[in-house]
Amino acid sequence: MIECSLGQQAMLICVDSYEGSVPRGRLYLPGQPGQHFESLSQLLLRGEQLLELGGGVQSFTTPRIFALSKPLRPEPCDARQPVRGNAATFEMRILFRQHASWQGELLWLEKNARQSFRSVLELIILMDSALRAEEN
């Protein structure tokens, strides 16, 4: 189980690589096994699934879908893997799930920098700016 300094609703995002603006790494929610992700869409979809399964902040809306489909198959992480990303590590605290998006705080652990976000798009821009800064 991962202990997060931001509290029980925090997710730990370990980005191991960021090539061509495609993040690859691991996602952790306290009390849940870690999940691998190979793209931004997998990161977001698995994050949403973990929020639903982990009893986190409840969504204010029911998601709209075209058709029922099987959820993404979980790809649990090796428990021996470090809980730090090779490229960057973030703690994300979801405060609200309104307007079919997430609102909260993102902490970039390597730089001890904290920033609030009002949407998933803003979250993506924050993470991209940190990962591009690490490249340079």
Image (spheres, grey):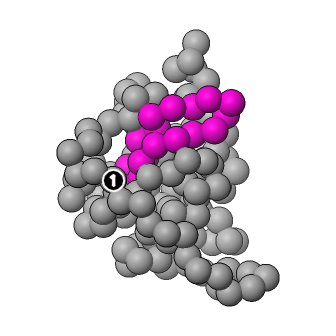
Q: Quadrant of the C terminus?
A: top right
Residue range corresponding to the magenta coloring: 12-28
Image location (x, y in percent) of residue 80: 20, 45
Residue under the point 39% across and 35% down: 85
Task: Name the residue at 23% across, 51% down.
Answer: 79
Q: Is residue 15 magenta?
A: yes
Q: Which residue is mark 1?
A: 77
Whether residue 110 is visible, yes or no, is: yes
Outermost residue toward the top? 136
Q: What residue occupies the far right of the structure in this picture?
A: 66
Q: Is residue 29 above or below residue 105?
A: below
Residue type of the residue flagged with mark 1:
Cys
Residue 55 coordinates in the image, percent (x, y): 38, 78
Left/right of residue 86 with respect to residue 45 in the rendered view: left
Res 82 quadrant in image: top left
Residue 124 drawn at (x, y percent): 64, 45
Q: How many other residues sit within 10 Å of disc 1, few (<14), some (14-19) or many (≥20)?
A: some
Query: Could you say whether the residue bearing mark 1 is in a helix, strand or loop?
Result: loop
For image coordinates 57% across by 31% down, the residue present is: 18
From this view, report whether residue 134 is shown above or below residue 97.
above
Q: Quadrant of the N terminus?
A: bottom left
Total residue callouts: 1
Is 59 rendered above or below residue 14?
Answer: below
Asked if residue 108 is positioned above or below residue 51 in the image, the reply reads above
**Quarter of the figure with residue 98:** bottom right
Q: Residue 35: x, y in percent?
A: 41, 57
Residue positioned 54% across, 69% down in the render: 72
Q: Nearer the viewer, residue 46 or 36?
A: 36
Residue 107 appearing in the image: no
Assess whether residue 39 is covered by the magenta stretch.
Answer: no
Q: For the stretch drawn in magenta, what is the main secondary structure?
A: strand
